[in-house]
Image (cartoon, helix red, strand yellow):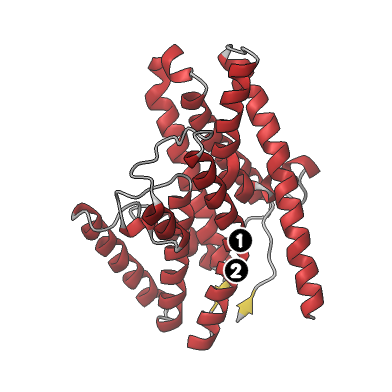
Amino acid sequence: MCYKNKWIYEFDYLRIIAIFAVIISHGYGIFGGASLYNSLQSYMGLLGAIGVILFFFISGFLLSKIEPEGIKSLIIHFKDRIFRIGPLFWIALFLTASLFSLNIYQGYWIKNFDLFNVIINSLFLNNFTPNYVIPPFWFVSALVLFNFVYLVLRNFFKNPFYFVVSSLGVYFLFLTLEMAGIIWATNAFIYFIAGVLLGLLYNANIFTMSKIKSVHPVISTISESSYSIYLFHLIIFGAMVNLFALFQITNFFIRLGIAIIIMVCVCILIQKGYDFLISSKSKRGN
Protein backbone atom coordinates (compact mmCIF):
# COMPACT_ATOMS: atom_id res chain seq x y z
CA MET A 1 0.00 0.00 0.00
CA CYS A 2 1.38 3.36 -0.99
CA TYR A 3 0.81 6.33 1.34
CA LYS A 4 1.91 9.77 0.19
CA ASN A 5 2.85 11.82 3.23
CA LYS A 6 1.12 15.06 2.36
CA TRP A 7 -1.14 16.89 4.75
CA ILE A 8 -3.26 19.85 3.82
CA TYR A 9 -4.06 22.30 6.61
CA GLU A 10 -6.92 23.79 4.58
CA PHE A 11 -8.96 20.69 5.42
CA ASP A 12 -8.92 21.54 9.12
CA TYR A 13 -10.89 24.67 8.25
CA LEU A 14 -13.15 22.81 5.82
CA ARG A 15 -13.95 20.23 8.51
CA ILE A 16 -14.83 23.02 10.96
CA ILE A 17 -17.22 24.53 8.41
CA ALA A 18 -18.70 21.11 7.62
CA ILE A 19 -19.25 19.95 11.19
CA PHE A 20 -20.73 23.25 12.39
CA ALA A 21 -22.98 23.38 9.32
CA VAL A 22 -24.36 19.96 10.27
CA ILE A 23 -24.77 20.54 14.01
CA ILE A 24 -26.32 24.01 13.61
CA SER A 25 -28.74 22.61 11.02
CA HIS A 26 -29.75 19.79 13.38
CA GLY A 27 -29.78 22.03 16.46
CA TYR A 28 -32.12 24.46 14.69
CA GLY A 29 -34.81 21.79 14.62
CA ILE A 30 -34.04 20.06 17.91
CA PHE A 31 -34.00 23.17 20.12
CA GLY A 32 -37.09 24.87 18.70
CA GLY A 33 -35.68 27.09 16.00
CA ALA A 34 -38.02 25.65 13.37
CA SER A 35 -41.12 26.85 15.23
CA LEU A 36 -39.65 30.29 15.99
CA TYR A 37 -37.94 30.99 12.67
CA ASN A 38 -39.85 28.92 10.15
CA SER A 39 -38.64 31.09 7.26
CA LEU A 40 -35.12 29.74 7.83
CA GLN A 41 -36.19 26.10 7.39
CA SER A 42 -35.01 25.74 3.78
CA TYR A 43 -31.73 27.54 4.54
CA MET A 44 -31.01 25.26 7.48
CA GLY A 45 -31.64 22.23 5.28
CA LEU A 46 -29.24 23.64 2.70
CA LEU A 47 -26.67 24.35 5.42
CA GLY A 48 -26.77 20.72 6.60
CA ALA A 49 -26.51 19.46 3.02
CA ILE A 50 -23.43 21.64 2.42
CA GLY A 51 -21.79 20.18 5.53
CA VAL A 52 -22.41 16.61 4.40
CA ILE A 53 -21.19 17.37 0.87
CA LEU A 54 -17.98 18.85 2.28
CA PHE A 55 -17.39 15.73 4.38
CA PHE A 56 -17.84 13.45 1.37
CA PHE A 57 -15.49 15.63 -0.68
CA ILE A 58 -12.80 15.72 2.04
CA SER A 59 -13.02 11.94 2.58
CA GLY A 60 -12.58 11.30 -1.13
CA PHE A 61 -9.65 13.70 -1.38
CA LEU A 62 -7.78 12.15 1.54
CA LEU A 63 -8.52 8.60 0.38
CA SER A 64 -6.91 9.39 -2.98
CA LYS A 65 -3.53 9.13 -1.24
CA ILE A 66 -4.04 5.38 -0.99
CA GLU A 67 -3.11 3.20 -3.95
CA PRO A 68 -3.96 -0.49 -3.45
CA GLU A 69 -1.34 -2.89 -4.78
CA GLY A 70 -3.49 -5.95 -5.34
CA ILE A 71 -6.42 -7.77 -3.77
CA LYS A 72 -4.56 -8.53 -0.54
CA SER A 73 -3.59 -4.88 -0.11
CA LEU A 74 -7.19 -3.82 -0.80
CA ILE A 75 -8.57 -6.21 1.81
CA ILE A 76 -5.99 -5.14 4.41
CA HIS A 77 -6.76 -1.46 3.97
CA PHE A 78 -10.53 -1.95 4.03
CA LYS A 79 -10.29 -4.11 7.15
CA ASP A 80 -8.05 -1.54 8.84
CA ARG A 81 -10.55 1.19 7.94
CA ILE A 82 -13.46 -0.73 9.45
CA PHE A 83 -11.54 -1.40 12.68
CA ARG A 84 -10.49 2.26 12.84
CA ILE A 85 -13.97 3.77 12.51
CA GLY A 86 -16.05 0.82 13.76
CA PRO A 87 -15.68 0.96 17.58
CA LEU A 88 -16.87 4.57 17.95
CA PHE A 89 -19.61 3.91 15.41
CA TRP A 90 -20.87 0.84 17.29
CA ILE A 91 -20.67 2.59 20.68
CA ALA A 92 -22.73 5.51 19.36
CA LEU A 93 -25.22 3.09 17.79
CA PHE A 94 -25.54 1.12 21.05
CA LEU A 95 -26.09 4.33 23.04
CA THR A 96 -28.70 5.53 20.57
CA ALA A 97 -30.54 2.20 20.75
CA SER A 98 -30.36 2.10 24.55
CA LEU A 99 -31.47 5.70 25.14
CA PHE A 100 -34.22 5.42 22.55
CA SER A 101 -35.58 2.24 24.17
CA LEU A 102 -35.62 4.04 27.54
CA ASN A 103 -37.39 7.09 26.02
CA ILE A 104 -34.47 9.32 27.03
CA TYR A 105 -33.25 10.04 23.51
CA GLN A 106 -36.10 11.42 21.40
CA GLY A 107 -34.87 9.74 18.24
CA TYR A 108 -34.93 12.60 15.76
CA TRP A 109 -35.74 11.47 12.19
CA ILE A 110 -35.58 7.78 13.13
CA LYS A 111 -38.10 5.54 11.34
CA ASN A 112 -38.94 1.89 12.01
CA PHE A 113 -36.61 1.60 14.97
CA ASP A 114 -36.25 -2.02 16.09
CA LEU A 115 -33.64 -4.76 16.52
CA PHE A 116 -33.42 -5.37 12.77
CA ASN A 117 -32.72 -1.66 12.29
CA VAL A 118 -29.85 -1.80 14.79
CA ILE A 119 -28.36 -4.92 13.17
CA ILE A 120 -28.55 -3.44 9.66
CA ASN A 121 -26.89 -0.23 10.82
CA SER A 122 -24.20 -2.09 12.76
CA LEU A 123 -23.19 -3.87 9.53
CA PHE A 124 -23.02 -0.56 7.59
CA LEU A 125 -25.86 -1.77 5.33
CA ASN A 126 -28.57 0.78 6.02
CA ASN A 127 -28.12 2.41 2.60
CA PHE A 128 -29.58 -0.79 1.19
CA THR A 129 -32.66 -0.55 3.42
CA PRO A 130 -34.21 2.90 2.83
CA ASN A 131 -36.86 2.40 5.53
CA TYR A 132 -34.29 1.63 8.24
CA VAL A 133 -32.34 4.81 8.79
CA ILE A 134 -30.74 6.04 12.02
CA PRO A 135 -29.04 9.41 11.68
CA PRO A 136 -26.15 10.09 11.64
CA PHE A 137 -25.14 6.48 10.87
CA TRP A 138 -26.33 6.55 7.25
CA PHE A 139 -23.46 8.92 6.44
CA VAL A 140 -20.76 6.64 7.85
CA SER A 141 -22.33 3.63 6.11
CA ALA A 142 -22.26 5.53 2.82
CA LEU A 143 -18.58 6.37 3.37
CA VAL A 144 -17.78 2.70 4.03
CA LEU A 145 -19.48 1.82 0.75
CA PHE A 146 -17.70 4.62 -1.13
CA ASN A 147 -14.34 3.60 0.35
CA PHE A 148 -14.87 0.05 -0.83
CA VAL A 149 -15.91 1.14 -4.34
CA TYR A 150 -12.91 3.47 -4.61
CA LEU A 151 -10.43 0.78 -3.56
CA VAL A 152 -11.89 -1.75 -6.01
CA LEU A 153 -11.91 0.69 -8.94
CA ARG A 154 -8.44 2.02 -8.12
CA ASN A 155 -7.10 -1.51 -7.91
CA PHE A 156 -8.47 -2.60 -11.29
CA PHE A 157 -8.22 0.69 -13.22
CA LYS A 158 -4.73 2.14 -12.84
CA ASN A 159 -5.18 4.33 -15.91
CA PRO A 160 -6.77 7.63 -14.78
CA PHE A 161 -9.09 7.78 -17.81
CA TYR A 162 -10.57 4.34 -17.16
CA PHE A 163 -10.82 5.12 -13.47
CA VAL A 164 -12.86 8.26 -14.21
CA VAL A 165 -15.10 6.41 -16.66
CA SER A 166 -15.68 3.51 -14.26
CA SER A 167 -16.40 5.94 -11.39
CA LEU A 168 -19.02 7.75 -13.45
CA GLY A 169 -20.50 4.38 -14.39
CA VAL A 170 -20.85 3.48 -10.70
CA TYR A 171 -22.41 6.88 -10.02
CA PHE A 172 -25.12 6.37 -12.64
CA LEU A 173 -25.67 2.83 -11.34
CA PHE A 174 -26.21 4.28 -7.86
CA LEU A 175 -28.66 6.84 -9.26
CA THR A 176 -30.61 4.11 -11.05
CA LEU A 177 -30.80 1.98 -7.90
CA GLU A 178 -31.82 4.99 -5.84
CA MET A 179 -34.61 5.94 -8.24
CA ALA A 180 -35.82 2.33 -8.07
CA GLY A 181 -35.95 2.55 -4.28
CA ILE A 182 -33.39 -0.25 -3.86
CA ILE A 183 -30.64 1.89 -2.38
CA TRP A 184 -30.45 5.44 -1.07
CA ALA A 185 -28.09 8.24 -0.06
CA THR A 186 -25.61 7.23 -2.77
CA ASN A 187 -26.14 10.21 -5.07
CA ALA A 188 -23.51 11.83 -2.82
CA PHE A 189 -20.96 9.51 -4.47
CA ILE A 190 -20.41 12.25 -7.07
CA TYR A 191 -19.02 14.59 -4.36
CA PHE A 192 -16.83 11.82 -2.97
CA ILE A 193 -15.45 11.04 -6.44
CA ALA A 194 -14.92 14.76 -7.13
CA GLY A 195 -12.73 14.82 -4.02
CA VAL A 196 -10.89 11.68 -5.16
CA LEU A 197 -10.17 13.13 -8.61
CA LEU A 198 -8.94 16.44 -7.20
CA GLY A 199 -6.83 14.46 -4.72
CA LEU A 200 -5.28 12.41 -7.53
CA LEU A 201 -4.32 15.63 -9.31
CA TYR A 202 -2.82 16.93 -6.08
CA ASN A 203 -0.86 13.75 -5.43
CA ALA A 204 0.45 13.86 -8.99
CA ASN A 205 1.70 17.43 -8.34
CA ILE A 206 -0.64 18.77 -11.05
CA PHE A 207 -2.78 20.63 -8.54
CA THR A 208 -1.33 22.31 -5.45
CA MET A 209 -2.75 23.57 -2.16
CA SER A 210 -1.11 23.94 1.27
CA LYS A 211 -1.14 27.74 1.24
CA ILE A 212 -1.74 27.58 4.97
CA LYS A 213 1.27 26.33 6.89
CA SER A 214 -0.29 26.00 10.34
CA VAL A 215 -3.63 26.13 12.12
CA HIS A 216 -4.73 27.25 15.57
CA PRO A 217 -4.63 24.37 18.09
CA VAL A 218 -8.35 24.80 18.87
CA ILE A 219 -9.25 24.55 15.19
CA SER A 220 -7.02 21.50 14.82
CA THR A 221 -8.49 19.81 17.92
CA ILE A 222 -12.10 20.31 16.79
CA SER A 223 -11.19 19.15 13.28
CA GLU A 224 -9.57 15.99 14.62
CA SER A 225 -12.69 15.33 16.72
CA SER A 226 -15.16 15.84 13.86
CA TYR A 227 -15.89 12.11 13.60
CA SER A 228 -16.92 11.89 17.26
CA ILE A 229 -18.90 15.10 16.96
CA TYR A 230 -20.80 13.75 14.00
CA LEU A 231 -21.55 10.40 15.68
CA PHE A 232 -22.51 11.65 19.13
CA HIS A 233 -23.99 15.13 18.60
CA LEU A 234 -27.61 13.98 18.29
CA ILE A 235 -27.31 11.80 21.39
CA ILE A 236 -25.92 14.69 23.43
CA PHE A 237 -28.45 17.13 21.96
CA GLY A 238 -31.22 14.71 22.98
CA ALA A 239 -29.91 14.67 26.53
CA MET A 240 -29.64 18.47 26.55
CA VAL A 241 -33.29 18.83 25.53
CA ASN A 242 -34.29 17.02 28.72
CA LEU A 243 -31.79 19.03 30.79
CA PHE A 244 -33.11 22.35 29.47
CA ALA A 245 -36.67 21.24 30.22
CA LEU A 246 -35.61 20.38 33.78
CA PHE A 247 -34.07 23.82 34.35
CA GLN A 248 -36.79 25.59 32.32
CA ILE A 249 -34.35 27.16 29.84
CA THR A 250 -36.48 28.16 26.87
CA ASN A 251 -34.47 30.72 24.86
CA PHE A 252 -33.52 29.10 21.55
CA PHE A 253 -30.13 30.79 21.17
CA ILE A 254 -29.06 30.05 24.75
CA ARG A 255 -30.15 26.41 24.36
CA LEU A 256 -28.33 26.01 21.05
CA GLY A 257 -25.16 27.79 22.23
CA ILE A 258 -24.84 25.86 25.50
CA ALA A 259 -25.61 22.55 23.78
CA ILE A 260 -22.98 23.08 21.09
CA ILE A 261 -20.28 24.06 23.59
CA ILE A 262 -20.97 21.11 25.89
CA MET A 263 -21.34 18.68 22.99
CA VAL A 264 -18.05 19.75 21.36
CA CYS A 265 -16.14 19.50 24.65
CA VAL A 266 -17.56 16.03 25.42
CA CYS A 267 -16.82 14.78 21.89
CA ILE A 268 -13.24 16.09 22.03
CA LEU A 269 -12.74 14.05 25.21
CA ILE A 270 -14.30 11.00 23.53
CA GLN A 271 -12.02 11.34 20.50
CA LYS A 272 -8.90 11.95 22.60
CA GLY A 273 -9.64 8.89 24.72
CA TYR A 274 -10.35 6.77 21.67
CA ASP A 275 -7.15 7.89 19.91
CA PHE A 276 -5.17 7.12 23.07
CA LEU A 277 -6.60 3.60 23.24
CA ILE A 278 -5.87 3.04 19.54
CA SER A 279 -2.28 4.29 19.84
CA SER A 280 -1.71 2.22 23.02
CA LYS A 281 -2.99 -0.90 21.30
CA SER A 282 -0.82 -0.18 18.28
CA LYS A 283 2.30 0.21 20.46
CA ARG A 284 1.57 -3.07 22.24
CA GLY A 285 1.13 -4.74 18.88
CA ASN A 286 4.56 -3.54 17.80
Q: How many marks?
A: 2
Q: Which residue is mark 1?
A: 87
Which sits in the foreground, 132 or 227? 132
Q: Residue at x 71, y 40 (%)?
A: 266
Locate the N terminus by quadrant: bottom right
Q: Amino acid at mark 1?
A: Pro
- Distance Cα–Cα, label 2 vs label 1: 7 Å
Mark 1, other Cα within 10 Å: few <14 / some 14–19 / many ≥20: few
Residue 194 in sight in this render: no
Residue 205 higher or lower than 266, as above or below: below
* Numbered tag placed on residue 227 in the rendering: none
Asked whether disc 2 touches disc 1, contact meaning CB atoms under 8 Å apart, the reply is yes
Mark 2 secondary-structure assignment: helix
Locate the C terminus by quadrant: bottom right
Which sits in the foreground, 4 or 280? 280
Please give left or right for residue 167 compared with residue 228 in the image. left
Q: Residue at x 37, y 56 (%)?
A: 116
* Numbered tag placed on residue 83 in the rendering: 2
Q: Amino acid at mark 2?
A: Phe
Residue at the extreme front:
102
Mark 1 secondary-structure assignment: helix
Residue 26 in sight in this render: yes
Q: Residue at x 47, y 60 (%)?
A: 122
- The spot of residue 188 in percent (x, y) is 38, 52
- The spot of residue 130 in percent (x, y) is 30, 51
- The spot of residue 43 in percent (x, y) is 42, 26
